[in-house]
Image (cartoon, helix red, strand yellow):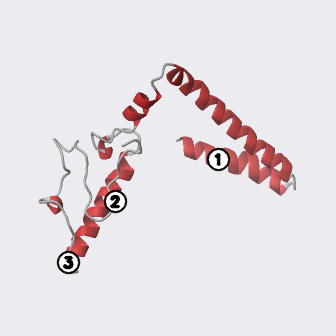
Amino acid sequence: AAPAVAAHLLVFHALHLHTQQGRTGAAVARCVGYVAVAAATTAVSFGPVAAAGQLTNMFARLFPFGRGLSHAYWAPNFWALYNTADKVAAALGKKMGADVAAPAGYLAGGMAGHGGTGAQTHAVLPTVIPAAA
């Protein structure tokens, strides 16, 4: 919901009204104000975690690469589509005669791991790994 609210604020409360009235400076000031409020809210939210030295631990919980991103909380729909696109690309590649190095049983459905919660490997698209690895 946050991206939709941000888009609404920027379009209807910052850019649209002020640029129609020829007040580009006011539109830029309103956008900068929105960014400042978002940055301050983020700093207040993450500040105590960072002060406790637990920022890395928090990011490991937000982005659980070990469990498989399709079962994470923050963007499972994107990763499910990413995994599906990889399987479709692998199937099309095999059908067209390309040498696709897919793991055994990769195109049979489901995901790698225990109960669908393990790390996903990809045959065509790049396998996503944590930046800290």
Q: Nearer the viewer, residue 4 or 107?
A: 107
In the picture, residue 99 is in which quadrant?
Answer: bottom left
CA gap, disc 1 and disc 2? 34 Å
Badge 3 density bin: few <14, some 14–19, many ≥20, Cα 10 Å: few
In the picture, residue 93 is in which quadrant?
Answer: bottom left
Name the residue beneath numbered marker 1: 8
Q: Nearer the viewer, residue 67 or 109?
A: 67
Quarter placement of the C terminus: top left
Contact? badges 1 and 2 (CB < 8 Å): no
Residue 103 sits above or below residue 58 on the image: below
CA gap, disc 3 and disc 2? 20 Å
Name the residue beneath numbered marker 2: 126
Left or right side of 119 for 39: right
Q: Amino acid at mark 3?
A: Lys
In the picture, residue 92 is in which quadrant?
Answer: bottom left
Mark closest to the chain's N terminus, 3 or 2: 3
Q: Amino acid at mark 1?
A: His
Name the residue beneath numbered marker 3: 95
Mark closest to the chain's N terminus, 1 or 2: 1
Q: SS at mark 1?
A: helix
Contact? badges 3 and 2 (CB < 8 Å): no
Camera-near label (1 vs 2) is: 2
Q: Residue at x 75, y 47 (%)?
A: 14
Contact? badges 1 and 3 (CB < 8 Å): no
